[in-house]
Image (cartoon, rainbow, N blue to C red):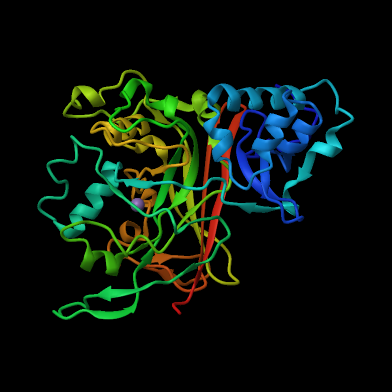
Amino acid sequence: MNTWLTIASDSDFSIHNLPFGIFDPGDGQPRAGMAIGDHIVDLAAAAENGLLGKKRYFKKLFEQPVLNDFIAEGKTVTNGVRRKIQTWLCLPKAPENAAKILVERQNVQMHMPIRVGDYTDFYSSIEHATNVGKMFRPDNPLLPNWRWIPVGYHGRSSSIVVSGTPVRRPYGQILPKDQDTPIFAPSQRLDFELEMAFVIGKNTALGEPVPVERAEEYIFGLLLFNDWSARDIQRWEYVPLGPFLGKNFGSSVSPWIVPLEALKPFRVKGPQQNPAPLDYLKTTGARNYDIELEVGIKPENGTETVVCRSNMRYLYWSMAQQLAHHTSNGCNVQVGDLMASGTISGPDADSFGSMLELSWGGQKPVPLHDGSTRTFLQDGDSVIMRGWARKDEVRVGFGEVVSGILPAR
Ligand code: MN
């Protein structure tokens, strides 16, 4: 595929990608766009200029501050728009209406791409679950249910924010070491979690399970997801009902949703599942996606150090298995719901997806380029997550999710 636009060969937003997002070009009217190289296709303008047919229908969908209504139209419509824009971008020469439709990406403000309905966080990396288990229960790291159930919990959607939004260090109840009375204080163990999240693209009815082999029909696309975590708050509160205030003070997403269709060339086999999953979780063929991931820490006014390189392919439970399990009891899902993978750690010490693991519970400080070290995050630090898939000349990337940490109030 050749486009008349100049696109750098290492651009995340190649002609093969075409992710959807919500941007404000500076007029205070956030609207739908599609990233291509250093530009954005203003989709309402594309509709206005007759690229998509059904002008009024598409303008109404795209002149909105979230993508939910567009996504709810279904994959026939959303993939149809992608194909038409792709065809337009691959015309033999730059069309005359290009200037009316393209916006420079560096000049815009990105917004939350969807109004998130319900949010669920899984725990699907066996390396992450084993590492965390080892720190809390050295003799029995992986609990007996883990290889049978894609473990997860219901989170909170109100505090999910888009890349660029600062995150404030939370206060909470913390039990100081060797004491039996908690204090109320700012978290001293603020952490990131490197995750991917998928956006639900199709409603189900209450009582209607999604079969695992059809689960991807319900997935619109994927985002980078930073699940901020306060380990000291989490450690004291999590028994017996699981994560709560150590998690719900904030999670950050990348602004561009990469459609599942753009990721098809990057399907790979997942790790061997042993024991074999129960029938309702059994899949055939390649169930995972080969998406390279990295995390950088940039101190205030400093340079970035990449502290983690991982890959989505390490996930033990796939997105399809997560969704099949989530709905197996009849729980319904709705367009705009977000399901995050859980921290994606790999087998090597530099592929661990959280500071909890990289610093092994705070025992092994992680060196940064400026000579300082981190066990957990400091005020003023920015955390940068990136993700991309690559095969031969084809690159499909997610851009970044970047957030700076503000001191506790
Ligand atoms: Mn998480």
Give the percent coordinates (x, y) of residue 86.
70, 25
Residue 363 in view in this figure: no
Residue in the picture at 15% in, 78% down: 178
Would you say 90 lies left or right of 145 here? right
User: Residue 53 location in percent, x, y?
Assistant: 74, 23
Left or right? Give the position of 103 relative to 115. right
Establish if 393 lies above or below 316.
above
What is the count of numbered marks? 0
Residue 211 in the image: above or below residue 330: above
Q: Position of residue 167 (x, y in %)?
A: 49, 66
Picture residue at 61% right of the left edge, 43% below the top: 21
Please state the horizontal and vertical placement of residue 169, each as a whole percent of the image.
Answer: 43, 72
Q: Quadrant of residue 99?
A: top right
Residue with the most extreme left position = 139
Dividing the image into 4 quarters, which one contains the C terminus?
Answer: bottom left
Q: Is residue 114 visible?
A: yes
Q: Quadrant of the N terminus?
A: top right
Residue 349 horizontal side relative to residue 150, left or right? right
Rendered image quadrant of residue 174: bottom left
Residue at image coords 33%, 35%: 332
- What residue is at 66 percent from the left and 33 percent from the top? 14
Please, which residue is most extreme toward the right here? 96
Q: Nearer the viewer, residue 35 or 75?
A: 75
